Amino acid sequence: MSHEWIDAGYLVGAVCFIWSLKLMNSPVSARKGNMVAMFGMAVALVVTLFNPGIKSSNLALILGTVAVGGVLGFVSARRIQMTSVPQMVAILNGLGGGAVTLVALFEFLHASHLGLTPPPIQSVTTVLSAIIGSISFSGSIIAFAKLQELLPGRPLTFKGQQVFNLALLIFVAALSIAILAFDSATVPVFLLLIGCALVLGVSGVLPIGGADMPVVISLLNSFTGCAAGLAGFVLLNSALLIGGGLVGASGLILTLQMCVAMNRTLGNVLFGAVGATISTGGNAALAGKQPKAYSVDDAAILLTNANNVVIVPGYGMAVAQAQHQVKDLAAKLLAMGIDVKYAVHPVAGRMPGHMNVLLAEADVPYEQLYELEQINPLFPETDVVLVIGANDVVNPAARYDKASPIYGMPILDVDKARTVIVSKRGMNPGFAGVENELFLMDNCVMVFGNAKDTRASVCRYRARLAAPSRTTNLT
């Protein structure tokens, strides 16, 4: 196949990548967007196999590795639980960064073996792709370990950690300059550069807590995209360049949007160590109060007496895999003529769009999903809010307590509703390490237990939910 046809195939792949991003702007068309992206990647992969630079003797090896990777990816995607998608995103992102690092390493080894001096642009992009790919790889592995609870979800810090990270970053920069400035840079120096970048990725993600994991995943995804785009320069591959650039740019935009959603800077997310200590909150009026514990039967009565209900999903729903039970409960309420909405906070869960993914998996209609700006004005007129495993995103302390690590973060104003039912396993604080004063308010009741079991128990009280007489006095 001629270079013209190969370039045309890469162009088709790039157009598909751009189109897929457009389709992913809406959950309604997101599935189609994934299919378009898959088709574009398939085209780019096939035309690459016809590259004249690939030796025919290596073709069987390449096809074998592609087959193994394809089978592993297919099987993993089929078996993965929706609650484990954040971990899978983290590990796949890390593998992408690692692959870019290997590309940079082998290109450097190839040039060193032949005694070649690559053009400056290729030398710079080789070094940068090695650094960024290594940071993305090791950082994503740590993110995976935290999400999988192989490591504690809280920030892991040590004395002088920020100084260590800064010194390591300076050393990596110095090594990079040395490699680029001296043509005689040896392979051990390049390996040392990769090793330091790997350590930097580990030490950079360890002090970031679970509350900020969605931002970290998005940022590392941007890193991998940037590294892949730089690898496109190294390999003179336009599809890799365009695809990596799209991932890098979109990941960075998403990262900044999520920081805005938390009213925090990216620097505070990376270096603030939110969740390292537990904050007790600052509302003296609630001091000494105890939460009001209700039974499942009591919660069913409250729901029966409501004219409108807002469901707020959180990570607890994901852990319990309760999205289908929640959908069933909402369907019963809707059948009774009760208006049901879902309030989705942009940083609820452990990855960008986590709650949207779970609700979509349960076939919750998209028109029932409301974003923070849409739903907050409706809470004062809401009869019952059902909070399922959410914590920090509904904590009123974010509005006024300047000592709280979540101060200033936009929250769902569930405390302004007439009645709030919180389904939670216990009174433990959320990922930010902040005790939630919502649980002690007069209009809040707690239903303790696993979210899946609680929702199923509520559904079993169908006779109550179907009661012909309902009132709106919920307090």
Image (tube, helix red, strand yellow):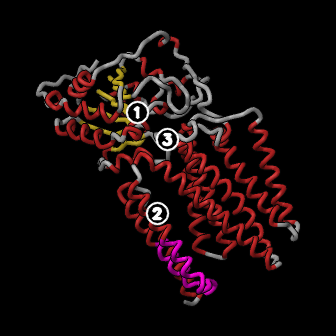
Q: Is residue 462 left or right of residue 5?
A: left
Query: 203 or 291: which is nearer to us?
Result: 203
Give the spatial CA distance, label 1 vs label 2: 33 Å
Query: 431 or 263: which is nearer to us?
Result: 431
**Badge 1, how many Cα within 10 Å: few under 14, some, many 20+?**
many
Instruction: Give the residue at mark 1.
Output: 389
The percent position of residue 12, horizontal first and vertical second, equals: 49, 77
Amino acid of disc 3: Val
Q: Residue 5: which quarter of the image?
A: bottom right
Give the spatial CA distance, label 3 vs label 1: 14 Å
Q: Is residue 107 left or right of residue 409?
A: right
Secondary element at tag 1: loop
Q: Is residue 61 magenta?
A: yes
- Residue 129 in the image: above or below residue 135: below
In the picture, which quadrant includes the C terminus? Answer: top left
The numbered mark, 3 or 1, whose residue comes first in the sequence reads 3
Q: Is residue 165 magenta?
A: no
Q: Magenta segment, which residues?
A: 40-67
Amino acid of disc 2: Leu
Which residue corresponds to the image point at 42% horizontal and 58% vertical from the top-left? Answer: 77
Query: 338 or 148: which is nearer to us?
Result: 148
Amino acid of disc 1: Gly
**Badge 3, how many Cα within 10 Å: few under 14, some, many 20+?**
many
Q: Nearer the viewer, mark 3 or mark 2?
A: 2
Instruction: Give the residue at mark 2.
Output: 72
Q: Which mark is residue 347?
A: 3
Which residue corresponds to the image point at 63% horizontal and 54% vertical from the top-left? Answer: 136
- Residue 81 in the image: above or below residue 248: above
> Which residue extends farthest bottom?
2
The percent position of residue 385, horizontal first and vertical second, equals: 33, 29
- Residue 200 in the image: above or below residue 158: below
